[in-house]
Image (spheres, rainbow, N blue to C red):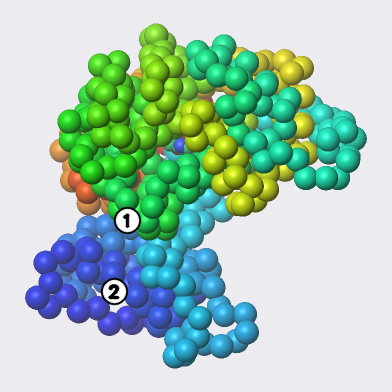
Amino acid sequence: MDVHISLVGRKDLSGEIYRQLRRAILDGRIRVGSALPPSRVLAERLSVARTTVTVAYDRLISEGFVESRIGAGTFVSPQAIRPARTGVRPERPGVLRPQPVWQQFGLSTAFANRARIDFRTGLPEASLFPTQRWRRLMARATAAEEVAAGVYGHPAGHRGLREAIARHIALSRGVQTSADDITITSGTQQALDIVIRVLLRPGDQVAVEDPGYTPPRLLLRAQGMRVIGVPVDREGLVVDAIPRSARMVYVTPSHQYPLGVPLSLSRRLALLRWAERHNAAVVEDDYDSEFRFGGRPIEPMQTLDPAGRVIYLGSFSKTLLPTLRLGFVVAPLSIRDAVHKAKYVTDWHTSLLAQETLAQFIEEGGFAAHLRHARAVYVERHATMAAGLDRELGEHLELVPSDAGLHVAARARAATPEQVVEVVERASQEGVEVHPLSRFAVMRPLSGLLFGYGAVEAERIPEGLGVLRRWFERCR
Ligand SMILES: Cc1ncc(COP(=O)(O)O)c(C=O)c1O
């Protein structure tokens, strides 16, 4: 496949290759399923460094336009464009067109292909899920009165589940709340969608962490918000760098995603003062802090906030399974009714069957037992990962200290972001998948890697790190 790319007079060469390839995919000039030229070949053709091309390819992969298949190459993903069902060619004048924002990113299909050793983040150990027990509880839940009645429920969700969650987060996180403040959602992502609808208008500015978790940024942009990246240092989000005009700040204070540092107590208090001074909201995404391996947990921002500015989001994606799509939002009283209405107009309520099953699982003590077991598994993986990184990759990477969650970050000592991307690509060809830190940059590219250990058995961690070490040595 010979796609025309012109770099004459251009400055940002990687960005230009990325944009021209993206356009060619969206226009249908490069068909779904066809291969992009190998990065080395395209680099030679364009007379640029190979890493210039690999950075562009990595961006296309992370946005779901293309996917890399081990040992075979890089292919246009079937999800990159959907063929028009009516058979009308999408480029014909006068056909329906989505708003431009929906052309700006593709669907990520990354997880459809599991790797031999998968260090990508966002994956808990699926084999820990208590399948038998869940099946039994689900059968019982099917007959439960609320489910069997066959009528819609309250948009805030199943009362028993909300009470069970209120007790659980009071114990595990010290979040003081009542069931009335909780709304059950389809994961954190829907919770954020609802909060945006309730509090913001298109064009509003929202501050996010840089580097930070990508899905909220896409959601904010899709809703017409202006997203501003705010740097993160050893104490977490740099509160002094938040622009005054931001109406909302989205943060991961317990375990910053991706770097893993907790937001210090003084920064938490400064952020609350900032929000009060500027009449802004703080969205606290507490996505994985059930898994702590040392150190004292810092109080959630929600408990430090007497003014009702913090919206607390929780998820069962890490503690149970991301495919369950279960999460919740703890909303301050002033927006509670609006949150219920926003949930109601979005999808009425989350599946009652799933809610009833989870409520019983928590009530019977199954969830607490599962967390104890999972914590023991992850504590070993966390220790193996930290020791392995030091031993195998200490020369190339510096671990960012972190004692919670299911991943750690490591900054490159010397390698550039482009060199790291090359290591990632090479390792991928050997069945080892890992995210480069640069993928999570908003404005400031960072050089390093992110190691998820949720889905990699402790015994396999050294093997995966060994593959990466070899490629760090060769790609110098
Ligand atoms: C920072 C962060 N927030 C939230 C989530 C969970 O999102 P959801 O509940 O929508 O699955 C994840 C999962 O990987 C995450 O990394």
**Which of the two residues, 409 or 74, is positioned nearer the viewer here?**
409
**Which of the two residues, 40 or 227, is positioned nearer the viewer here?**
227
Residue 368, quarter of picture = top right
Position of residue 36 measured from the top left corner of the image (x, y, whole percent): 38, 71
- Say the numbered circle drawn on residue 8: none
Question: Is disc 2 surrounded by few (<14), some (14 to 19) or many (20+) residues within 10 Å?
Answer: some
Is residue 255 visible in the rendered structure shown here?
no
**Which of the two residues, 274 or 75, is positioned nearer the viewer here?**
274
- Quarter of the picture containing the C terminus is top left
Position of residue 312 measured from the top left corner of the image (x, y, whole percent): 47, 29
Residue 46, quarter of picture = bottom left
Q: Residue at x 28, y 62 (%)?
A: 56
Is residue 6 visible in the rendered structure shown here?
yes
Outermost left residue: 9
Residue 39 appears left or right of 453: left
Position of residue 278 measured from the top left corner of the image (x, y, whole percent): 26, 34
Residue 191 appears left or right of 2: right
Residue 418 appears left or right of 154: left
**Which residue is tagged 2?**
20
**Which residue is tagged 1?**
203
Marks 2 and 1, how far apart at CA: 28 Å
Q: Are marks 2 and 1 in contact (CB under 8 Å)?
A: no
168 w.r.t. 389: above or below = above
Hey, what amino acid is under mark 2? Gln
Q: Say how many tags the image has.
A: 2
- Of the numbered discs 2 and 1, the one sitting upstream in the chain is 2
Q: Residue at x 67, y 41 (%)?
A: 155
Hey, what amino acid is under mark 1? Gly
Position of residue 350 measured from the top left corner of the image (x, y, whole percent): 68, 42
